[in-house]
Image (tube, rainbow, N blue to C red):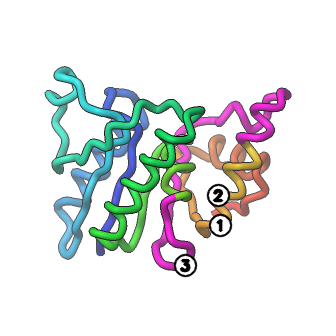
Amino acid sequence: MRVLHVMAGLPPGGAHRLALDLIGWLQQQPDMEQRLCVLKEATTRLRSLRVPITPSYLGYSGNYRNPFETLACIQLLRQHIEEFQPDIVHSYLWLCDVLSASALHPGRERMVSHICDRREYLTAPHLKAWFRKKLTIHLLRRASASYVAVSAAARDFFCENTGFPES
C-alpha cells in the first residue's frame, strides 16, 4: 500500500507528533510505502526533528489568500500525487485537507482527513468562517474523503457541523 502524508509544517505540536508517530509505525509494516509532503519550507530547527522518512518540502508560505501561490502549491502537490500514485492521501489539519482535496483526481485516489481538533471556523458566526466551512465540506465531499478523529469529542463536533456521517 502507498500512503502520501500531507502536513503543513513540522513544528513539534500534537497533530504533527501524531503524524510522525504514525509514519514511524507504518514504516515497520510489510508492503507499506510512504511519502511525506510538507507544505512549508523547513527551518534549521525543524530539520533536526526525527522524521521517519525524508520529507518533500513544497515551499508554500501558508498564505491561502494568495491565489497564485495556493494554485502553485496545489499543482506541485498534484505532481507528487501523480508521480507516487498513492492508494491513500492522508492529510493533517485544515489547510492540508483543502489543498489535498483540491489536488486529487476524484475517484482515483482515496483521501483520509485527520481530525485533530475542534475546527472553530465550523461554528464561527462571520462570513469568512461560513465560506471556509462551505469550501471545506465541498472539497472533502468532492474527494470522497474519509476521516479519522483523535477523540469522540472531535468526531462528534466535526460530524455535527459538517453533516459527515460518523465513521
Give the CA separation, mark 3 to mark 1. Answer: 9 Å
> Which residue in the structure is indicated by mark 1?
142
For the point 28% across and 45% down, the residue is: 21
SS type, badge 1 = helix
Q: Amino acid at mark 3?
A: Gly
Q: As rendered, which of 67 and 96 lies closer to the eye?
A: 67
Q: Residue at x 78, y 49 (%)?
A: 160
* Mark 1 closeness class: few <14, some 14–19, many ≥20 residues within 10 Å: some
Amino acid found under the numbered disc labelled 1:
Arg
x 49%, y 60%: residue: 103
Q: Which mark is residue 139?
A: 2
Outermost residue on the front side: it is 68
Q: Residues within 10 Å of mark 2 (few under 14, many from 20)?
A: many
Left or right of 25? Residue 74 is: right
> First in sequence: mark 3 or mark 1?
3
Provide the secondary structure element on which disc 2 rests: helix
Vertical arrangement, residue 108 with respect to residue 52, above or below: below
User: Marks 2 and 1: in contact by CB < 8 Å?
Assistant: yes
Q: Marks 2 and 3, Cα distance to the nearest angstrom?
A: 13 Å
The label number, if any, that marks residue 107 in the structure image? 3
- Which residues lie in the magenta part? 103-132
What amino acid is at disc 2?
Leu
Say whether residue 75 is left or right of residue 130: left
**Quarter occupied by the C terminus:** bottom right
Viewer-proximal residue, 68 or 44? 68
Q: Total label count?
A: 3
Residue 42 quadrant: top left
Assess whether residue 82 is covered by the magenta stretch.
Answer: no
